[in-house]
Image (spheres, rainbow, N blue to C red):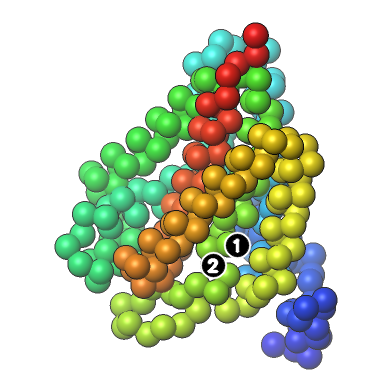
Amino acid sequence: MTDDEREEWWLGGQRVSWRDLLTAIAWLTALPVGHVARAREGPSALFYPVVGLALGACWALCDRAAGAVMPALPRALLVLVVWLVATGGRYATGVARTCAALVSSNRRRALESMAGQTLTLSGCIGMLLMLAVQLRSLVVLDRLRLPALLYAPMLAAWSVVVLVHGSRAARMDGRRVKYAPDVSFREFAVASVITFGVLFSVSQAVGILVGVVVGAAIVGIRVGLHGWLDGLTEAAVRASADITFTITLALFAAFPAAS
């Protein structure tokens, strides 16, 4: 690491570069920018909510275009496929690998399942159930459809920062090391301010309710993963982001339709 990268900015940490934005895009989406980005987990975490919100805006535009020519179910199917393509199916795959690990007999087998490339029957069932909840929410969404499509990707991206900040890495050898040591309080604080500033300023009471429920869910997931695996894996982090995404859609879909 160079002296410039060690230079403090605000509460300390590495100097932010435009490449860190590309790193965030590469992790959160399937856009081919990985060959340009430098893998710096710390500063890139600052951009996660911004990238998530931009992804949500593009998603909402696709939904608006589809809504002009399609009824509810085909529209929801198309929009869900667009989401899966935009993210490369990485979140859904994380759910499949985590569900496969849930039926493992011990921690070592669970970690092996998460690191494996083959999807098991239990993993596919879990993934399909999650997709079914997402599809149902997209069909039902009415009055709050736009904020749901905007905020679900943003909250999913923010949840990654919350999960990895200060968390341990789940390892086969049992060593206790940080999962993302460069993600400091600076990244956690700035990402949270951006996320809740957008959420509360636009959606007000609804945004507060969604933020509280989603925040509590993320804390519960974090505690559960550390109790189960003694830390995080990439599959678990992506699965957690997908759970956050699904909860957000479901919460907005639960509000009554416009009369």
CA gap, disc 2 to disc 1? Answer: 5 Å
Task: Tell me if residue 82 comes above or below residue 97 in the rendering.
Answer: above
- Of 232 and 73, nearer the camera is 232
Q: Locate residue 57 relative to residue 162 in the image: left or right.
A: right
Residue 185 placement: quadrant: bottom right
Q: Locate residue 92 relative to residue 191 in the image: left or right.
A: left
The residue lying furthest to the left in this view is 105
Amino acid at pointer 2: Val
Q: Residues within 10 Å of mark 2 (few under 14, many from 20)?
A: many
Residue 226 lies, in percent from the top left, at: 39, 68
Amino acid at pointer 1: Val
Residue 39 lies, in percent from the top left, at: 63, 71
- Of 71 and 156, nearer the camera is 156
Q: Residues within 10 Å of mark 1 (few under 14, many from 20)?
A: many
Can residue 17 be spotted in the picture? Answer: yes
- Of 213 and 13, nearer the camera is 213
Task: Tell me if residue 228 comes above or below residue 137 in the rendering.
Answer: below
Look at 35% across and 48% down and name the residue there. Answer: 96
Residue 196 lies, in percent from the top left, at: 71, 50
Q: Quadrant of the N terminus?
A: bottom right
Look at 28% across and 39% down and name the residue there. Answer: 125
Task: Tell me if residue 158 comes above or below residue 170 in the rendering.
Answer: above
Residue under label 2: 164
